[in-house]
Amino acid sequence: MTDRTVLDASTLSGWRKSSHSGSESGSCVEVLDGHPSGVPVRDSKAPHGPALVFPAAGWSAFVAAVKDDNFPA
């Protein structure tokens, strides 16, 4: 693993997806809480693929911006 990437995200356990995701498990991103390097994020369609690891403060700012609707279509 590098500081920003987990090459095989399936090696980590405890992934969760948003409660706003539909019942189709293949159309969302998943995050992992409590990782020492930050917040890993993976594509649920590729659980054995890579995960990107974001700094916790950056991920929190992104989530807050999404909740505040700061990304108009």
Image: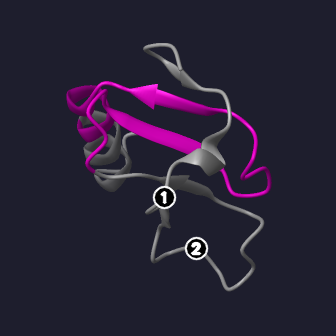
Which quadrant is the C terminus positioned in? top right
User: Of the numbered discs in the image, which one, if any, rests on residue 13?
Assistant: 1
Q: Position of residue 70 (x, y in %)?
A: 37, 40
At 78% from the left and 50% from the top, the residue drawn is: 46
At 43% from the left and 63% from the top, the residue drawn is: 14
Q: Would residue 37 appear left or right of 14 to someone viewing this image?
A: left
- Within 10 angstroms of label 1, few (less than 14), some, or many (20 or more) residues? few
Q: Residue furthest left?
A: 57
Looking at this view, is 9 or 62 the one in front? 9
| Residue matched to label 2 | 21
Looking at this view, is 18 or 15 the one in front? 15
- Of discs 2 and 1, which sits in the foreground? 1
Report the magenta residues as a range. Answer: 34-60
Vertical comparison of 36 with 69: above or below: above
Q: Position of residue 21 (x, y in %)?
A: 58, 73
Q: Would residue 63 appear left or right of 60 to someone viewing this image?
A: right
Callout 2 amino acid: Ser
Q: CA distance from mark 2 to mark 1?
A: 19 Å
At 72% from the left and 74% from the top, the residue drawn is: 25
Residue 38 lies in what quarter of the image?
top left
Residue 57 inside the magenta-drawn segment: yes
Q: Position of residue 30 (x, y in %)?
A: 54, 56
